[in-house]
Amino acid sequence: MRCPYCSSEDSQVKDSRPAEDGAAIRRRRICPDCGGRFTTFERVQLRELMVVKKTGRKAPFDRDKLLKSFEIALRKRPVDRDRIERAVSGIVRRLESSGETEIASEEIGLQVLEALKALDDVGFVRYASVYRDFSHVDDFEKILAEVAAKIARDPGADG
């Protein structure tokens, strides 16, 4: 692994442990040339995934971009980072095990909405407003009615 500080081609693993509920390995490394310490994460990748955008353009799937979407939707919300990581890992696992190498961006968006609905109602509404391209206040009222109905069915599920 290349050192991020001095670009040396050599680094030594000092500690390894499971991360993300065993879905990744966290490695603490040290560079023998400059002494720099850094952390890497190693994940299993079942297959290369391509995202097919609404325009038809294709782009490589980016787990970090998916994580960023959750972070934006849940900014300043009381949702534990581990729960977010588990939600992202779950989506990635489902996508990789689907057998498809090309995934429509809409499918990813629906999975994000589903995960956010379980994590936090405010994050769900934030993401839905962008994903569903809300253009009028009525759009918010509809989604809020959906959330209110969910809370009425299960009072403990209010995010």
Image: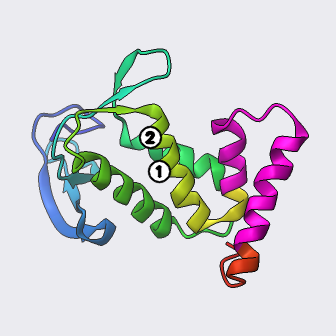
What's the residue at 75%, 69% (across, down)?
149
Q: Is residue 59 visible?
A: yes
- Left or right: where 80 falls relative to 8: right
Badge 1: residue crowd in 10 Å (few <14, some 14–19, many ≥20): some
Q: Residue 58, located in which quarter of the rendered image?
A: top left
Q: Which mark is residue 111?
A: 1
Picture coordinates of residue 136, whole percent (x, y): 87, 35
Q: Inspect the image, locate mark 2, and give the three-letter code of the amino acid beneath it.
A: Glu
What's the residue at 41%, 42% (across, down)?
64
The magenta stretch spans which residues? 124-150
Q: Which mark is residue 51?
A: none
Q: Residue 107 carries which label?
A: 2
Q: Along the line of sight, which residue is nearer the eye, 30 or 54?
A: 54
Picture coordinates of residue 111, whole percent (x, y): 47, 50
Q: Are marks 1 and 2 in contact (CB under 8 Å)?
A: yes
Q: Residue 89, located in which quarter of the rendered image?
A: bottom left
Picture coordinates of residue 105, whole percent (x, y): 45, 32
* Callout 2 secondary element: helix
